[in-house]
Amino acid sequence: MTITAAADGSALGNPGPAGWAWYVDDERWAAGGWPNSTNNRGELTAVLELLLSTAHLDDELHILCDSQYVINCVSQWMPGWKRRGWRKADGKPVLNVDLLQQLDAAIVGRRFRFEWVKGHAGHDLNEAADARARAVAMAFQRGGVPPHGPGWPGSPHVASPQPAAPAAGDTLF
């Protein structure tokens, strides 16, 4: 069986209040975020949280993503970065390495494929993930309680509404 899910991130100000969300349907979705982060961190975290929430399943994941950055990171750039000690071709450190290393571990043994979808173009699953990620960012902006969703029923992984923030000195971009 294949699970089709959308993953999306949102940041108001970039950096600014930020959210992430993955969405399968109204019974299976999760969201979280931070008072201050970036869209790229939200996009990466959405995919990471989807992988962690479905790790107990043997199903293939069909991940709908409007972020070429995420798709390229996971499917093209990560192997080279790893060979170079998580450095880019120019020798500079890879940005968002904390999340990328977690993604690298989460994809081991997993069957998954990405499909790029145009953001804000009426794709139902992408729009649902986007709305939830944006709602989290807006809740942080207003000082309210962000929505978090039911997660994946039966999953031992419970998505943290606020995954670990980058360590002091880490670049948010």
Image (cartoon, grey):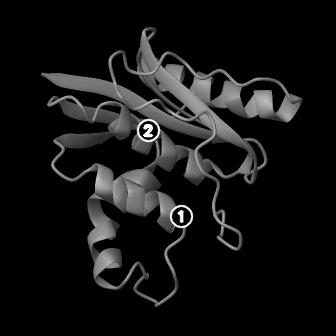
Q: Quadrant of residue 54?
A: top left
User: According to the image, label 1 marks what residue?
Assistant: 96
Q: Is 127 above or below relative to 83?
A: above
- Tell me which label, 2 or 1, sits earlier in the chain: 2
- Front label number (2 vs 1): 2
Foreground pick, 164 / 19: 164
Q: What element carries label 2?
A: helix
Could you tell me the amino acid type at mark 1?
Answer: Asn
Could you tell me the amino acid type at mark 2?
Answer: Glu
Q: Are the residues flagged by discs 2 and 1 in contact, CB closer than 8 Å?
A: no
User: According to the image, label 2 marks what residue?
Assistant: 49
Q: What residue sits 65% from the left and 70% below the top?
A: 170
Q: What residue sits 50% from the left and 63% below the top?
A: 98
Specify few, some or many for label 1: CA neighbours under 10 Å numbering under 14, 14-19, or 20 or more: some
Classify residue 162 as left or right of residue 143: left
Q: Residue furthest right?
A: 142
Specify few, some or many for label 2: CA neighbours under 10 Å numbering under 14, 14-19, or 20 or more: many
Foreground pick, 120 / 140: 140
Whole-Å distance between the Cαs marked 2 and 1?
15 Å
Q: What residue sits 84% from the left and 34% below the top?
A: 141
Q: In which quadrant of the rendered image does the N terminus lie?
A: top left
- Image coords of residue 2 (percent x, y): 17, 25
Classify residue 139 as left or right of residue 91: right
- Image coords of residue 152 (percent x, y): 38, 20
Q: Is 75 above or below relative to 157?
A: below
- Image coords of residue 60 (percent x, y): 17, 33
Q: In which quadrant of the rendered image does the C terminus lie?
A: bottom right
Q: What element carries label 1?
A: loop
